[in-house]
Image: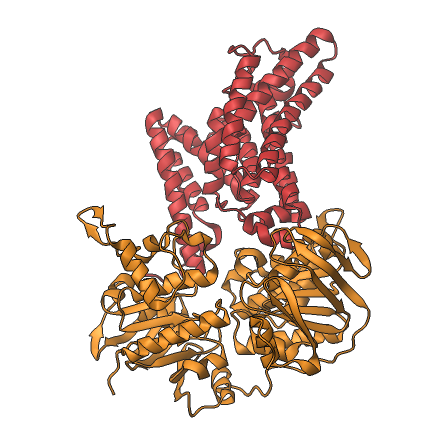
Chain colours: A red, B orange
Amino acid sequence: MTKAPNNPLKTAFIQLGILPFLLVAAIAFFALNESRFLSSLNIFNVARQSTFLIMIAMGQMIVLLTAGLDLSVGAVVGFAGVVSALVLKAMVAAFPDAMVLAAIVAMGSGVLAGMVVGLINGIGVALLNVPPFMMTLGTMTSLVGVSLSMTKGLPVTQIPDAFQDMLGYGRMFGMAPAMVFTIVLFIAMWLLLNRTTVGRYFYAVGSNIRAAQLSGINTKRQLMLAYLICSAICGMVGVLFLARTGSAEALNGSNYGLQAVAACVIAGVSLFGGAGKVRDVVLGAVFIVILTNGMNLIRVESYVQQIVLGAILILALVADQLRTRLITR
Amino acid sequence: MSYVLEARAVSKSFGGVRALREMDFGLRPGEVHVLFGENGAGKSTLINVLCGALQPTSGTILRNGEVAQFRDVQDARRQGVAAMFQEFSLAPHLTVEENIFLGAEPRNGIWLKIGNRRQRVQAALDAYGFAVKPTQTVMHLSRAQQQMVEMTKALMTDPKVLILDEPTASLSQKETEAMYGLIAELKAKGVGIIYITHRMKEIEAIGDRVTVMRDGAFIATVDVASTSQQHLVELMTGRQITNLYPDVAHKPGKALLHVTGLTTADGMINDANLTLHQGEMVGIAGLVGCGKSDLIRAVFGLSAIAKGTVEVDGTPVARPVPRDMLARGVAYITSDRRNEGLMMLRPTRENLTLSAIGQQPLSSGGFLKLGRERDMAQDLGTKLTVSPLALEKSVLAYSGGNQQKIMIAKAIARDTKVFLFDEPTVGIDVSARVEVYGFLKALVEAGAAVLIVSSDLPEVLNLSHRLLVVRDGRIVDEMPKADISESRVLAAFFGTAAA
């Protein structure tokens, strides 16, 4: 094997992982091949399109940190959208003048709907010891059924314009509302994971749950919290999604489920738990959106896009293995 | 002199680190050749190179005087070199017979030849005197039994060179005797045996020659018969260690831990009574599987209690759980560092402070005080002489001795009055051991109550102010320091009358 010990690229790879290289490569490639890629309009688009995935990926990350997995994130987005749409329409019908109140109640009920699912996942995983994969596969499957039967299989539409303006198309501090939510959530997540005991315990539980227990950590509570936080975030995304699209459907979030896991894994979050940085997860999500956006701009067929995404995911995992080997030797 | 296996100027580097430096080693047929050295001295690297698991960076390996190359472990086995590792290479969900043939299955084309497999395995197990059934699933076997399976697997290939890495570490006295018997038979057949151990007694019992390693390099090869223990330790550490076991002052104060009539739900412990005072070191000895660890694990809340009471500092604890016991000042330091002691891939700092991080002064209102955490971790690491201390390095990179120190430091990080040690020196080298004993002494003399459960008999014989013996889940003997003797302990182990 040829290797220069002081190769700066290699040092950077060991320190940062594969993601920065992929990001730079993708941006350079699309910028050279398509002039519209770096236009301010497109950058704004990418930023806005990334928000949902970034938020869901941050939720998924907490679960992954505890060595778990939440397959139900996409279904929660759809379910929370349906719940908040129905609540919103009922509120508007009852109190036509109190739009702000209706929006707040709708938002709250969406988040609450998510938390109910999170509680069920948490009870299954933490208290009943069901493997996370099976538990969340179960809730995902039933949840789609619940959403479909609540809407009789039809999308919920005719969402009041005022609601869509407020949380979807309007401006908060000069930004898209979803952007503001993403920034606030990122700061909150960063603080949680780097500056609080609860955050530290997520890493501990994922690294070695027995050691965490022997160190006096309430491991069941931590697992429970992980699923709760993840689902609450997805519930919130469901509401924002509703405000953006103006229609609520059971399968609205289904694309996000695996993309969020992919974003985390590309960002170096270990599927075995205990390792991962929230900053990288944001970059991971942005990378996936950039890739999709760029391929759309240079008119790559959607089937081919799937092939590229899958291949890059595998490449990232292989690179991560290589990196682990470089670190431990 | 003809060697059955020889290493000449073998070096092995990992990245920039040289784990082996021009190592020379020669194994004669029919000898037990002990490899001796501290953790990190390069013993494991050497045997990994000799059994084909690693390729040397430079140097040559000779088999019966001819240059040999082992592509991998299977290749080495075909050439008559088999190894039995400390970390078992068994598949837990497969049966004994499946494991024994794993990687070398007899086949008819693509089909497994199952016909006489069971008889062959049974015959081998009988021949070696191992009480294991070929159809048992490996995960349901005890550690000692798993070791027997591993040994059978190595021996089925009829090796001329056998490498054993601490084979008796998890064996009881009786099983150890059986292992020695087996080794004697193999020697008589002319098999050369490379044997890694940290135990002096073992070297004297079965070793013919000893090769001492330090810092990845050859130090000396000596005959066991003409070398004193003291000299061996000096060769290994490069300095003089006069006394392994310190004298610990005994000033018992009030009772801090009081256990009466303890019976566990799984029946491992029956009607145990135990009192532990301030400023006292109490040892618990017993054979593997007698329940001695289960006793302190139950006290700490790691297995359910069916009957009996536990009192900490005069206050009864209805149902012990680890979180609550830690809050009461009781810490349990596990024997299983990897699986339940440390977060292997997390930084040393986080491991050191894990049990204390939820409390003042390291956090308040759920928010971490990172500066104070760093200071405390630095203090703890320095106090316990973790070396080299790198707070942000993952614990995995440290030797067993340093990892053990980190676990002790973790217990000290909180206001702990009662320390329950489960095998405090398992798998750590002599100089780390001396340091660990130093900390235990300091703890006891500062007024802590220390309980040591240990399979290392000299350790508990020499350190304990009082020594309890557990047999079949019951405390069968208790002796004050003046009455502690090896013969009385052994008599209690096996339930025979004291000599």
Q: Residue B300 in the image: x percent, y percent?
A: 68, 57
Question: Is residue B141 in sight in this rendering?
Answer: yes
Identified at 53% across, 56% down, the residue is B339
Splitting the image into 4 quarters, where does residue A54 fall? Answer: top right
**Residue B61 in the figure: left or right of residue B195:** left
In this rendering, the answer to whether B117 lies above or below B156 is: above
Quadrant containing the N terminus of chain A is: bottom left
**Residue B233 in the figure: left or right of residue B408:** left
Q: Residue B427 in the image: x percent, y percent?
A: 51, 69
**Residue B316 in the figure: left or right of residue A120:** right
Name of the residue lying farthest toward the bottom: B226
Splitting the image into 4 quarters, where does residue B333 fall? Answer: bottom right
**Residue B149 in the figure: left or right of residue A235:** left
Splitting the image into 4 quarters, where does residue A96 fall? Answer: top right
Question: Is residue B6 in sight in this rendering?
Answer: no
Q: In the depicted view, which residue is nearer to us: A17 or A201?
A: A201
Identified at 45% across, 77% down, the residue is B215
Quadrant containing the C terminus of chain A is: bottom left
